[in-house]
Image (cartoon, rainbow, N blue to C red):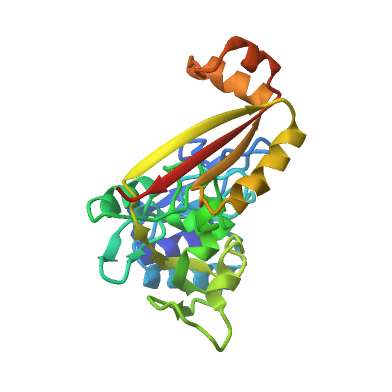
Amino acid sequence: MYEFAQQLAAIAGEENVIDGAASGSEDFTHDESLHGEPSAPALIVRPTGAEQVAAILEAATAAGVAVTARGSGSGLSGSAVAPAGGLVIDFSRMNKILSIDETNHTAVVQPGVTLNELDAATAERGLVYAVYPGEMSATIGGNIATNAGGMRAVRYGVTRENVLGVQAVLATGEIIRDGGAIVKRSSGYDLTQLIIGSEGGLALVTEATLKLRPRLPVRSTLLAPFADLDAVTAAVPAFLASGLEPTLLEYIDALTMAAIVYTAEMELGIPDDVRDGAQAYLVVTIEQRD
């Protein structure tokens, strides 16, 4: 492993190669999932570009070292946790927004860009990247790896509906590019869609072209209490059939709502008798232009 660590230092710089056991941090041993045992990687490397990622993967493949990609570690599936003796490629230094095209509504970003950072940059231009998995510190690379969804999926779809193309690196160290700032793709293999959701098992994404949308300035949110789950499930298709396009349409059971109210120290703003009889809630958000 020492020789392998020296190879990584030659690629990314000695200061960007960290001994997993001696790092003093438990951050890289887990993500936010509630299952799985913590596992410390043997090494952590922080590249700055696709060429470095390519050289790292080529070296890791030759050495037989397992590789795990990691963004902010906010995932819930354990996919950012390396096996013991493995290598973590930490994408925190690959965090540049390379371009935002206001005419064609696209953005090109590195995988370490967080949703918060992208949202702030697109808001200045009246645009938005619509994927919202619930954690704005999550990175674009992590979202792509897990095909993150979230509460806006009812209107805008999950990650795969919002990524137009990728640059990615194969285990051999080969850099590939698929898709881009285009909408119509009617022939050939769609490698972008194959890579999205593969959790790094096929390739590591080093750049992504994202679909942006106009940021709608008017937003209203409605909380609707229901007597039971059957009433909620009957209301949802009727609501969608009305022609309205909700940005958010989320079911919350009574126990979860009670926990939210208690933790956030908030009031629902509904009469006590209605609240006491409600076993289910529907949260609806509508967005539109002025």
Name the side, left or right, on which 20 lies relative to 253: left
Name the side, left or right, on which 195 lies relative to 18: right
With respect to residue 228, does 55 lie above or below?
below
User: Which residue sits at x=49%, y=15%?
Assistant: 267
Q: Depth check: 212 or 142 in front? A: 212
* Place of residue 239 in the rendered image (x, y in percent of width and height, measured from the top left): 60, 46
With respect to residue 224, does 155 lie above or below?
below
* Place of residue 55 in the rendered image (x, y in percent of width and height, measured from the top left): 44, 72
* Place of residue 107 in the rendered image (x, y in percent of width and height, measured from the top left): 33, 65
Q: Depth check: 222 or 49 in front? A: 222
Q: Total of numbered circles in the picture? A: 0
Query: Residue lying furthest top in this view?
Result: 272
Image quarter in which the N terminus is found: bottom right
With respect to residue 62, does 221 lie above or below?
above
* Place of residue 120 in the rendered image (x, y in percent of width and height, measured from the top left): 28, 47
Q: Is residue 24 visible?
A: no
